[in-house]
Amino acid sequence: MSVITDAIAPHGSHLINRVATAAEKEEFLAQADSLPRVQLDGRATSDLVMIAIGGFSPLKGFMEQEDYESVVDDMRLANGLPWSIPITLSVSQEVAEPLQEGSWIRLDDPNGKFVGILQLTQKYRYNKVHEAVNVYRTDEDKHPGVKVVYDQGPVNLAGPVWLLERESHPLFPPYQIDPAESRAMFREKGWKTIVGFQTRNPIHRAHEYIIKCALEVVDGLFLHPLVGATKSDDIPAEVRMRCYEIMLEHYFPQERVILAINPAAMRYAGPREAIFHALVRKNYGCTHFIVGRDHAGVGDYYGTYDAQHIFNEFKPEELGILPMKFEHAFYCTRTQQMATTKTSPSSIEERIHLSGTKVREMLRRGELPPPEFSRPQVAAELARALAIGSSN
């Protein structure tokens, strides 16, 4: 009898697990009141979880200076492995000053709850502007990712971490599927090729079109919307997840799709974040990753297809996951179907496509997006949710 193995190895070859064992948890709890404390913000809390469950493999903790500088400058860890986004724990000088390298640090979430342990191996200062320009391609603080860097503390704390326990997600427990579990599900289904799809926005017909194009050539689809911290004007995660549920119920072959949440925070780093998102999905077991127009972009900071071009800076075997690159999709009124410039004979006047910003404006005015842009059930859900939100 043949044994079905994983279709793809995790980044760095091993799936990291930094969730404390029962014995470790007991030891940490016994020392909790005597340990120095560092309070995490929302993004750092998400990073702690992603490290612990293996989503950020091969990272075992927050980056030391050598890895941090190599990632910022060259998009590689110090050992040469591709990695495009620095994963750091930044604190104020006042918080960092009394902490001793080699000691254990208690990590509390934004509400003050004890959630993890950091074994402090290093603390170091860093250049915020240098990080902003290299990672986000701008030093402007109106960029949401750059603003986070500028607002955080000037000292990075580094070292391996432990997550005290893996708790159920407060909003989406049925969709909390960690990398070890998603890999097991892919094996059980016999999927050898799996395409991952990332979005922070509600799903619309352009998304549906490129997803289904990808699904034509792989065994399964891993719908993996991000539910960590996003911009304040982004559609709330619970609304976006409901839209996915509607789409799965009515418009997708359910036996070929797995819907799960990505608990990471959004960086809005454009091209670099596209690489980062691909590597994270590789850790979840995906062999392919969809990269569309302005992936992980914000404003006008990145070129329309910069997030696709950046994959050419790496050898395919280095990344170990294949990007599936799609042009901007739209509804073609001449052919009366979704298309891109590669498949449509239409002129610009015969194409219907709306930006997320325009759709949000329509919904807040009480107008539904046209069916050529959004499935009617999804449009109705968005209108209902935004109407409730605007009345509060």
Image (tube, grey):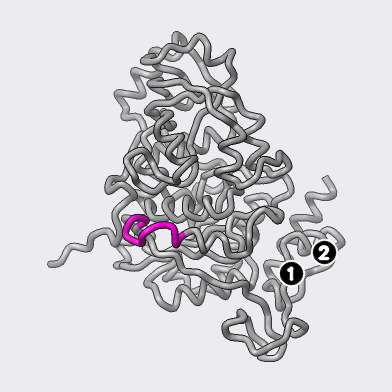
Q: Which residue: 34% across, 44% down?
A: 80
- Residue 5, image x, y percentages: 23, 60
Task: For the residues labelled 1 and 2, say whether their Cβ atoms are less than 8 Å apart.
Answer: yes
Please state which amino acid type lies under the numbered disc 1.
Answer: Leu
Disc number for residue 362 = 2
Q: Is residue 237 magenta?
A: no
Left of 378 or right of it: where is 87?
left
Visible in this render: residue 163? no
Q: Compare residues 80 and 352 and report the one nearer the observer.
A: 80
- Quarter-of-image position of residue 360: bottom right
Left of 199 or right of it: where is 48?
left
Residue linked to disc 1: 354
Looking at the image, is 240 positioned above or below residue 17? below
- Quarter-of-image position of residue 132: top right
Which numbered disc flags the more N-terminal residue, 1 or 2? Answer: 1
Spatial CA span between label 1 and label 2: 10 Å
Magenta stretch in the rendered image: 311-319
Visible in this render: residue 261? yes
Q: Main secondary structure of the magenta part?
A: helix
